[in-house]
């Protein structure tokens, strides 16, 4: 599993690994989906929406990307499953695909209120990148 | 305890300057011996970090339910000077005006012949958890009016009665709400979520007033022994979360623009009188108003079910009071003998104004402001009153709940939701949630004992206990 939950008293803290930055964003999206929707069965995708985020540095770009994804899950009732992303300088853009939220299938998680800068770290490792991030719930 | 932490008396402790660099004032927190055993270093560091912020007055405060949060600790309180002070979303939180209200009924536990049926009906009627959709169709115009007028507009739409408005802190609507500071994205999240509970520690609970601990105060508040009550805990939902997210970006820049030195990026802030600070205040106030409207709509749904099931009148379920837990507000306080207008941040803390304050409903004014402190699913909640001690010691503030001591991940590893629900049922508490994990994560064991937290605020004289309420049935988000 490219992400794991760490101890945190009030919120959900995750450690996420990926070989490069765009993969890290996708894995971070999957990590957030696991918080929001719990373990759910993967089905054929039937929704695709555009996503775009900017940030002064990679940490800010990560927070803004996840904030945008959170927004899309709420207003589009999207359960994200895959990402097609590109990066242009301090901007990330592309599409996120998935399935429409279904209360009978996707109620295994908890609402995320925001993406926190608290305890945020993004470091290079021998295998690529490692992100530690807290989802405020 | 750390060498820079000094015990003042049985319940009050001081974090001396120097605990972290650049503290402008010392920190003060309230803990009994038992609660002090579990205090987190991270929460104390956050309390000390708040003491570094420009314009902070007297002390940075921590209530007995203090724990590690975002920016401020949960249970953190700080007041800032009108001209030199700042405003920070880190002192309010993502869930702006997460708060709690209490409603009484003319019923007793003996009337609950089908508790499970009632809880299930409430669970179906009050949208709960991830993906919950509003039970009402809210127009853009009505959303705007809710952002401006809060609970009052919900009542005008038929969700409640006139008396409800006066029983909310700020009469259910903060002044200074600025609709233009609420983004289109926030509005998009707000429309489909009006009247929804959310998740996490949000709940709707049936309780019985099991112990009257102060006869006169309980009588003033209109609560009798054995009375069935309802408590609702939720906030401004995605709208408030988006407002926080949007303004954090702006305030990150404002920190650089105004040359504010911060010990922690989470305390991003701006001077109170700056355009950025004013804009955040306006957006936050509008979100707080949305939260009051949200709790008002849920209250209406609950009342309608009770009216139909028990054949009682709508007016027989009065709102006792509604308090905000996450908010920054302009208030007048006596500071060193001088009356000053200050901006009080309460992050996981409750206003607890003492007797005589004009902000308290006139019928409660001599008793002090009602303060509602929820316990966990299996432990008692309490109705208290604000005190003169709170006015002199904590800018009229007290705790907001039991306070977590155990992480969600460890709770899920050591407990299953089904086992927790079965255990609670043995005590007569029926629990309903969208999934078992939501029950495990909020099990009674993950919280500090509510009785100890409430005893501590009572011993510290920042609140007076009036009623203890035992849970009977719980809906967890």
Image (spheres, coloured by chain):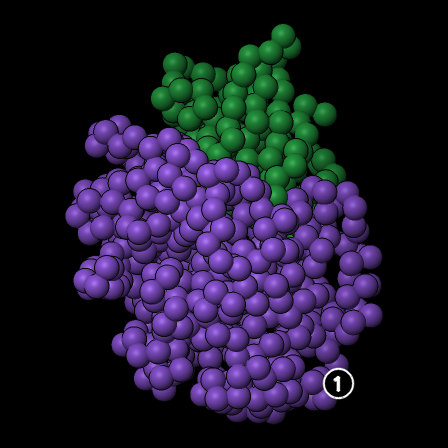
Q: What element carries label 1?
A: loop
Q: Chain A, which colour?
A: green
Viewer can see residue B129: no
Disc 1 crowd rating (10 Å Cα; few below 14, some 14-19, many 20+) is few
Q: Name the residue under label 1.
A: B113
Q: How many circles with numbers are drawn on the protein?
A: 1
Q: Give the x, y percent position of residue B175.
A: 25, 63
Relative to residue B246, is residue B468 depicted above or below? Answer: below
Q: Give the x, y percent position of residue B352.
A: 40, 68
Residue at screen point 28% across, 50% down: B57
Observer-nearest residue: B300 or B399? B399
Examine the image and state in which quarter residue B380 appears.
Answer: bottom right
Q: Chain B, which colour?
A: purple
Q: Give the x, y percent position of residue A36.
A: 61, 43
Observer-nearest residue: B32 or B48? B32
Relative to residue B315, is residue B45 depicted above or below? Answer: above
Judging from the image, mark 1 belongs to the subunit labelled B
Tell me if A132 is positioned left or right of B49 in this view.
right
Residue at screen point 48% across, 17% down: A86
Quarter occupied by the N terminus of chain A: top right
Q: Give the x, y percent position of residue B469.
A: 62, 76
């Amino acid at each position: 599993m490219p992400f794991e939950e760490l101890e945190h008293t009030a919120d959900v803290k995750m450690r996420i690994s990926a070989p490069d930055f765009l993969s890290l964003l996708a894995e971070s999206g999957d990590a957030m989906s696991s918080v929001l929707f719990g373990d759910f069965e993967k089905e054929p995708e039937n929704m695709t929406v555009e996503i775009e985020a900017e940030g002064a540095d990679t940490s800010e770009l990560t927070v803004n990307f996840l904030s945008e994804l959170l927004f899309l899950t709420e207003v589009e009732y999207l359960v994200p499953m895959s990402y097609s992303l590109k990066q242009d300088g301090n901007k990330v853009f592309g599409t996120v695909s998935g399935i429409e939220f279904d209360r009978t299938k996707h109620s295994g998680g908890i609402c995320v209120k925001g993406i926190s800068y608290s305890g945020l770290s993004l470091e290079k490792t021998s295998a690529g990148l490692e992100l530690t991030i807290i989802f405020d719930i | 305890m750390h060498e820079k932490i000094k015990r003042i008396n049985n319940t009050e402790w001081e974090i001396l300057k120097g605990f972290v660099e650049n503290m402008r004032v010392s920190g003060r927190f309230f803990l009994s011996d038992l609660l002090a055993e579990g205090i987190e270093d991270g929460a104390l560091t956050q309390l000390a970090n708040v003491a570094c912020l420009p314009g902070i007055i007297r002390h940075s405060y921590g209530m007995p339910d203090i724990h590690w949060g975002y920016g401020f600790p949960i249970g953190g309180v700080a007041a800032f000077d009108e001209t030199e002070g700042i405003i920070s979303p880190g002192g309010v939180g993502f869930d702006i005006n997460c708060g709690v209200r209490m409603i009484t009924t003319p019923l007793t536990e003996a009337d609950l012949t089908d508790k499970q049926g009632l809880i299930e009906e409430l669970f179906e009627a009050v949208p709960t958890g991830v993906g919950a959709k509003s039970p009402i169709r809210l127009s853009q115009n009505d959303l705007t009016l809710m952002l401006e007028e809060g609970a009052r507009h919900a009542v005008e739409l038929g969700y409640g009665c006139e008396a409800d408005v006066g029983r909310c802190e700020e009469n259910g609507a903060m002044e200074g709400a600025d609709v233009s500071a609420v983004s289109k994205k926030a509005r998009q999240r707000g429309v489909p979520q009006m009247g929804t509970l959310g998740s996490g520690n949000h709940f709707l609970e049936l309780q019985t007033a099991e112990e009257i601990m102060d006869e006169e105060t309980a009588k003033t508040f209109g609560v009798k022994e054995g009375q069935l009550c309802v408590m609702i805990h939720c906030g401004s939902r995605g709208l408030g979360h988006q407002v926080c997210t949007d303004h954090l970006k702006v305030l990150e820049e404002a920190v650089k623009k105004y040359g504010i030195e911060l010990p922690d990026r989470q305390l991003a802030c701006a001077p109170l009188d700056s355009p950025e600070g004013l804009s955040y205040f306006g957006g936050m106030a509008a979100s707080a108003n949305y939260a009051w409207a949200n709790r008002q709509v849920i209250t209406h749904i609950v009342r309608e079910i009770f009216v139909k099931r028990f054949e009682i009148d709508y007016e027989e379920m009065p709102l006792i009071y509604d308090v905000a837990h996450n908010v920054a507000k302009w208030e007048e306080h006596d500071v060193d003998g001088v009356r000053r207008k200050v901006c009080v941040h309460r992050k996981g803390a409750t206003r607890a104004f003492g007797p005589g304050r004009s902000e308290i409903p006139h019928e409660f004014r001599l008793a002090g402001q009602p303060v509602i402190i929820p316990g966990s699913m299996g432990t008692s909640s309490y109705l208290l009153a604000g005190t003169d001690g709170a006015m002199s010691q904590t800018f009229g503030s007290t705790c907001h709940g039991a306070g977590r001591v155990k992480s969600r991940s460890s709770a899920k590893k050591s407990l299953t939701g089904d086992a927790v629900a079965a255990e609670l049922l043995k005590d007569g508490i029926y629990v309903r949630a969208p999934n078992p994990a939501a029950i495990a994560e909020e099990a009674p064991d993950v919280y500090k004992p509510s009785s100890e937290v409430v005893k501590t605020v009572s011993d510290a004289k920042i609140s007076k206990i009036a009623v203890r309420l035992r849970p009977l049935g719980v809906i967890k988000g």
